[in-house]
Image (spheres, rainbow, N blue to C red):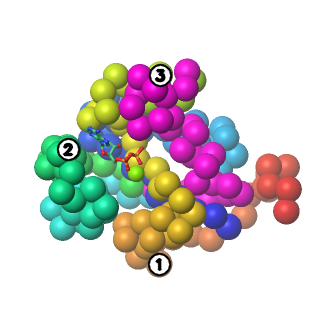
Amino acid sequence: MERSLVLVKPDGVQRGLVGEVISRLERRGLRLVGAKFLQVSQTLAEEHYAEHKGKPFYDGLISYITSSPVMAMAWEGPNAVAAIRQTMGATRPTEAAPGSLRHDFGLEVGRNLTHASDQPETGQREVGLWFQPEELVSWERAVDKWVFEN
Ligand code: DAT
Ligand code: MG
């Protein structure tokens, strides 16, 4: 089953939007498989954002993600990566579709509230970076057959 890392970033946590993010993903039909609330270390931040090293916004991005606790989660479902990115909205809140989280709650790219994996392979890698195998729960819901076709 496809998996994505989801982070409610420091601004989302500070603004009391953890429940809103979880609620939207649950409502979408996605299945939660892991969750933890943590203060992100410099090392984890740098590993997580390695692809952006050297970009003009990199230093600001690292200080933002390490500035205050985050809610880290792993979610799964068919097409989980595309579905979750759609629920989050485009990177820049002013380009995010109305109804998406970043549209509904955000204004600036540097305060865009959430992170979600951008490809299925990224999802596998990021879930592995943020969670130990024993922190992930494989489970079934009674409703799964009414949400997942196969
Ligand atoms: P996303 O978080 O939608 O996957 P990304 O991987 O391109 O976006 O960038 C990671 C984060 O870096 C993004 O959520 C916000 C920040 N960021 C990206 N582009 C930026 C820019 N041009 N200026 C400032 N911050 C930026
Ligand atoms: Mg990204």
| Residues packed near mark 2 inside 10 Å, few (<14), some (14 to 19) or many (20 plus) | few
Q: Nearer the viewer, mark 2 or mark 1?
A: 2
Residue occupying the far front of the picture? 55
Q: Which residue is mark 1?
A: 133
Q: Which residue is mark 2?
A: 57
For label 2, the SS is loop
Whether 128 is among the magenta residues is no
Residue lying at 63% horizontally and 64% vertically, measured from the top left: 2
- Regarding residue 33, the answer to whether it shows in the image is no
Q: Nearer the viewer, mark 2 or mark 3?
A: 2
Mark 2 or mark 3, which has the lower sequence index? Answer: 2
Instruction: Say which of 110 and 65 sits in front.
Output: 110
For label 3, the SS is helix
Residue lying at 37% horizontally and 25% vertically, measured from the top left: 106
The quadrant in which the C terminus is found is bottom right
Whether 87 is among the magenta residues is yes
| Residues packed near mark 3 inside 10 Å, few (<14), some (14 to 19) or many (20 plus) | some
- Regarding residue 52, the answer to whether it shows in the image is yes
- Give left or right: position of 129 versus 49: right
Residue lying at 33% horizontally and 54% vertically, measured from the top left: 37
Dividing the picture into quadrants, the one containing residue 53 is bottom left
Name the amino acid type tagged 2: Phe
- Up-down relation of residue 56 to residue 45 (above or below): above
Position of residue 79 measured from the top left corner of the image (x, y, whole percent): 68, 55
Q: Which residue is mark 3?
A: 104
Queried on whether the Cβ of the residue with tag 2 lies below 8 angstroms from ligand 1, the answer reads: yes
Residues shaded magenta? 73-98
Name the amino acid type tagged 3: Asp
Name the amino acid type tagged 1: Pro
- Measure how far apart labels 2 and 1 are at the Cα level: 32 Å
Position of residue 71 measured from the top left corner of the image (x, y, whole percent): 36, 49
Residue lying at 62% horizontally and 59% vertically, measured from the top left: 76
